[in-house]
Amino acid sequence: MKKVKFNFSVLIYFFSIILILVFTPEVLTFCSVTNLLAQETQSNFNKGEQYYIEGKFQIAKIFLEKALTEDPENYIIYYYLGNIYFLEQNYEVALNYYLKGVEFNKNVTIFYYNIGLTYYNLFKFEESIIWFLKVLELQPTNGSVFLNLGFCYYFLKDKENTLKYWKLYVEYPTDPVKREKILYFISVISDPNFKFPENMTASSSTSNTSTSSSSSSSSSSSSSTSSSTSSTTSSSSSIDTTLVDTILQSATTIDEVPPEPTDSEEAL
């Protein structure tokens, strides 16, 4: 009698197919439930941070404010909320969040910079100068700060300090085009006959910050907001500037501290 050889590998193969066909719906259902539970247990902070990264600021605000009641000492929450309100041009509220964030972490330079920029948008140039100078204590060659300080002193009609900080800026420029414009401004102001306009006011400055939900996040060394402005000089040796203040701090990831700004400054 001829013996039939039994192939166990074939049996295992068909048995595996049967198991997949029978149990796949249950497995998929289990995975779906697990994913839903994971989403439910995700913290308000993580949800808010994710929406912030995606540029969905209104939704992010809801979760971040909830997260703040749960963890009132988390300085990154103040950072995010401050940025959101700044972008909404609600500078008073943004300032409150930034100042509160500093209370919980005095080593994050970005807070000092943002506070200075926020005071600038509130036309409180003396206060703005105080905070920009704090940045220079930690970052003595920060070109953006030199540029901003020059504008602060310009609106305070302080010729000496305007020239001082704009001359420092051209040594540490953040943009070659801006450097050329500042060099021109320096030549105008350096004229012995230069006089600040009598009715000069910063109220003519406008904040024109634009963002898009699809591009509000970028790498930690760049940002998603953009600005445009024009600067002209008149024949009477005065500078007519339309300043646009931008805050460029959206980042795709947060490590231990928020990223430092690389281009946040007054756009010329």
Image: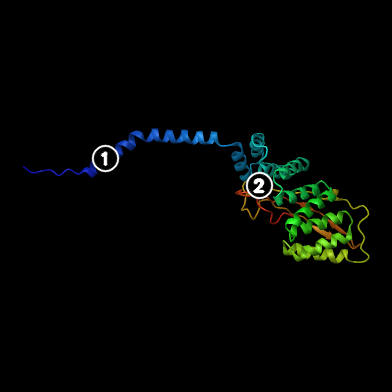
User: Considering only order in the chain, which callout, 1 or 2, is on the residue closer to the N terminus?
Assistant: 1
The crowd level at tag 1 (other Cα within 10 Å; few <14, some 14-19, many 20+) is few
Q: Where does the image place residue 152, in percent across and percent down from the top left? A: 83, 54
For the C terminus, the quadrant is bottom right
39 sits left or right of 67 in the view: left
Numbered tag placed on residue 212 in the rendering: 2
Numbered tag placed on residue 14 in the rendering: 1
Q: Where does the image place residue 185, in percent across and percent down from the top left? A: 83, 63
* Residue depicted at 59% across the width and 40% down the height: 46
Nearer to the camera, 135 or 215: 135
Task: Please say whether residue 95 is visible from this viewpoint.
Answer: yes
* Residue depicted at 74% across the width and 51% down the height: 113
Q: Where does the image place residue 88, in percent across and percent down from the top left? A: 73, 42
Of badges 2 and 1, the one in the foreground is 1
For the N terminus, the quadrant is top left
What is the CA distance from the residue labelled 2 to the residue labelled 1?
Answer: 53 Å
Q: Secondary structure at mark 2?
A: loop
- Residue 258, placed above or below residue 139: above
